[in-house]
Amino acid sequence: MDGSVSHARKTYLTSDSGLKVPMRAISLTNGGSVRLYDTSGPYTDPSYEVDVERGLPALRSAWIARRGDTAAYEGRAVRPEDDGRAAGPARMPSRAPARSPRRATGGAVTQRAYARRGEITAEMEFVALREGVEASFVRDEIAAGRAVLPANVNHPETEPMIIGRNFLVKVNANIGNSAVGSSSRPAGPDRPDLPASIADEVEKMTWATRWGADTIMDLSTGPDIHTTREWILRNSPVPVGTVPIYQALEKVGGDPAELTYELFRDTVIEQAEQGVDYMTVHAAVLLSYVPLTTRRRTGIVSRGGSIMAAWCLAHHRENFLYTNFRELCEIFAAYDITWSLGDGLRPGSISDANDEAQFAELRTQGELTKIAASYDNQVMNEGPGHVPMHKIKANVDLQRELCDDAPFYTLGPLTTDIAPGYDHITSAVGAAMIGWYGTAMLCYVTPKEHLGLPDRDDVKAGLIAYKIAAHAADLAKGHPGAQAWDDALSDARFEFRWEDQFNLALDPDTARAFHDETLPAAPAKTA
Amino acid sequence: MDGSVSHARKTYLTSDSGLKVPMRAISLTNGGSVRLYDTSGPYTDPSYEVDVERGLPALRSAWIARRGDTAAYEGRAVRPEDDGRAAGPARMPSRAPARSPRRATGGAVTQRAYARRGEITAEMEFVALREGVEASFVRDEIAAGRAVLPANVNHPETEPMIIGRNFLVKVNANIGNSAVGSSSRPAGPDRPDLPASIADEVEKMTWATRWGADTIMDLSTGPDIHTTREWILRNSPVPVGTVPIYQALEKVGGDPAELTYELFRDTVIEQAEQGVDYMTVHAAVLLSYVPLTTRRRTGIVSRGGSIMAAWCLAHHRENFLYTNFRELCEIFAAYDITWSLGDGLRPGSISDANDEAQFAELRTQGELTKIAASYDNQVMNEGPGHVPMHKIKANVDLQRELCDDAPFYTLGPLTTDIAPGYDHITSAVGAAMIGWYGTAMLCYVTPKEHLGLPDRDDVKAGLIAYKIAAHAADLAKGHPGAQAWDDALSDARFEFRWEDQFNLALDPDTARAFHDETLPAAPAKTA
């Protein structure tokens, strides 16, 4: 759980109103220092005492309460099936909620609703300081729908961050257990009361934020789904996303045909009350699009897309997420859940990139983006996937046009399919390019993609590759401040300030270790 | 030294005239098979008996002799200083040359000279089969200077390959010892007669070609420079490049001011007689360009560029490589050495990309490219280096324009400087893009770049990243045949043919191992 970054100090920027925004400071041997964006949360503050039982401080609680537009309520009772079909009888007592869930008492309580009214919230002020821009700019970008600030009122532990093409490119890390990888694991030695799979996921979350994850998605499908998510949320300093249909499917024993809108809505509310900040919803996979995938080389590869396509075909009815979209918008508005409109028909291979199935769904994403906007919802659009380099830009251009510049959130894309085991690299190429072209957040891919479940090393490898992609995109977009980091490292390199070069590196430990392998003597490092 | 690729077979295409072109064949569980370009040489042919003392068969000797335009001669006597200042008395007997060197008896014996006369050589025919194109197209591209076929008459062991924007994108791997990394190493246990540093480099060469290196550069600066190169050349199935100024500098004890043109020319002849196929020569670093670098963040980072700049400043005279360029063209024409016109003023940081120093040198590269063409020389141009994404395309466009479409050969470029330890990734992004834009060969970067000397694992990591970049570029350029590999793997993935997916992977061993970690049972792989 120790997230300290070697040779870095936690520091805070303080706003006029007293907000403390965390940064990572690196002191240089020449007397200078460099300050970097920091996603690692309180864990890297030596004065913070980690207690995962208690969870993180509820930084935003006072801000939310002060707005006076939400109220606590009893909330939905947790049921055994919330922990998934693999759970059987609850394996550990559900954690007693430290506080009742809140929801809107009147209109939308989304950051977008406030922005549209011209208000600058504490969250926006925090983000402005974090990104080095004016708070009014943050507000205007959110109001226009060009950026989202995912911040469920029930996840007050989150440190506000923003996702939009005119801000630093962000990176998401997927974590989560599965029945295959985790169900038979015993309790961990450190925490005999906590199933190992839960401890693993909390550990992966802190590890991911330590290496720069701006958000994490909990994609658990194994045991203890509800409980795992509760532990993650209470301890996560970054927004948490989910794909609610995964949990809904577990509740019906894994048969897509058994899904209902009512069950899905109940699952959304369950997760909304826990504090999930954004949700992937495959509402744009329409019945009429499914036949478009039959001529594909690799059909439908998105899990959510496959589930909804199976439901549509089984009932020969339109996707219930699409037909009930407006009610979901009302729910999202009451908690400030951000839409991540899924791309269930994304290509699963280079061969299928930019085909009619993919772009038909994107057009429907655009339609839904406009509807969500009318409910003051915050909206992102998910994108592919597997795309050769020459077809990447068209994805961004079309998404911007169809979805009114809503933030694009892409998985990679992988630029070739020939390198399983190295898809963090095949996709970092595409991620860097699509980030440059305007994608706001990049969902990482680990070396285990297509092969197995990522472990701790894979999570780190995926994050490093994606932080490289995101930063290369920031440089290419000319983001103010991005170049300063490179310049500081280049100066250290040119002046043979080895220690500074290591400490400024994205991964100081590896840079130092690689150097030591061949030139172990200290004089070589300060020469 | 064992280069066999797991689950792959060596196979040969046979031309009408009886040429045998090696390929790597992968048999699929569904009865199909896929044939891939193969750089690994005879080592992966189980019927070939490896003997590094004897070296590889001289595949091209008969072709060269048949042309009747070269003759064997006594050659330059090898001198103790040829093995570098670190050598002292020769540490092992120089290997007796198996054959006398050859050179032209009349005009140029370059592939370009033949192409311009309308001749299709055996080398061109070999390449045509290897690339799947018409031999006349190969000839025309070489004649126009848009492609090079590096093939010194004294390196008959090489399997002909071509470098040009209208062919598959190629990858070079740098190897070579250094005084720091290798001088104190004892002889290896396997070959007590062979200094470990030589055995290491021969091993690295075969390892690199095993993982797809299309050419290798021997950048040795440590002990036994001449002898190491001899062993590499006699055992290398791919063209070998060098930077002769490195060896020349060792001969004068490391002081650039002591260099002379005569010494350089003698070194070129020494290496020409050994069979070096292409040489990096920093002839475009002009005296007047050196002051342009003083305002840079990271000055001159190319070693060759630094050496020539130091010489120019010490003598306040024009670069002797520039003033003697025409005589060097005559030498290159007599052995068919391909120019790799160095970019001694390439940027060493994101901050310095595309500056006046860099582009001034590129203009002079263009001038020299035209002069070399008038001698029927084959010419490539080297390019950067460190370039943010949005400045990459300008490099290719300008090089094409100034250098008459001569093949561009770039190092990366790195797209950010913040990730020492991961520069194979920061640069694979740039390499893929610049390959797509038209760069013909990519010089790999290993994870140890800027930090230390690459070991075996680093060589592999660098090559995998660069084969990904090159192949992604081939896909984006729409190279016929490139897509077929991806399609075969995508089909295997969609049909859960796990064994085929592993065997088709760029690195079957890693793909298989990653899968096994989480799903070890055989049924999981054939499900």
Image (cartoon, coloured by chain):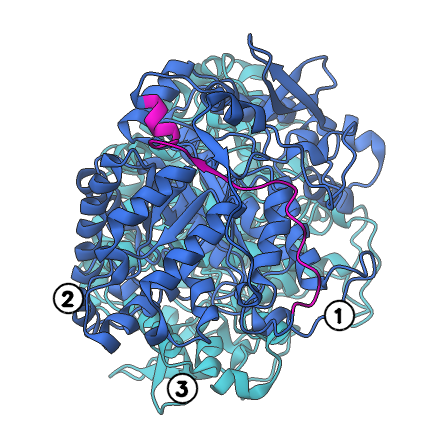
Chain colours: A blue, B cyan
Residue designated by label 3:
B28
In this orientation, does residue B253 appear?
Answer: no
Which numbered tag is attached to residue A288?
2
**Does A478 appear above or below B425?**
above
Front tag of 3 and 2: 2
What span is in magenta? A90-115
Residue B454 in the figure: left or right of residue A368: right
Label 1 secondary element:
loop
The percent position of residue B511, horizontal first and vertical second, equals 54, 71
A284 magenta-colored:
no
The residue under the point 70% across, 56% down is A199
The residue under the point 57% across, 68% down is A222
- What separation in Å lies between label 1 and label 3 (alpha carbons)? 39 Å
Work out whether mark 2 precedes mark 1 in sequence or the reverse, and give the earlier one: 1
Residue B294 in the figure: left or right of residue B248: left
Front tag of 1 and 3: 1
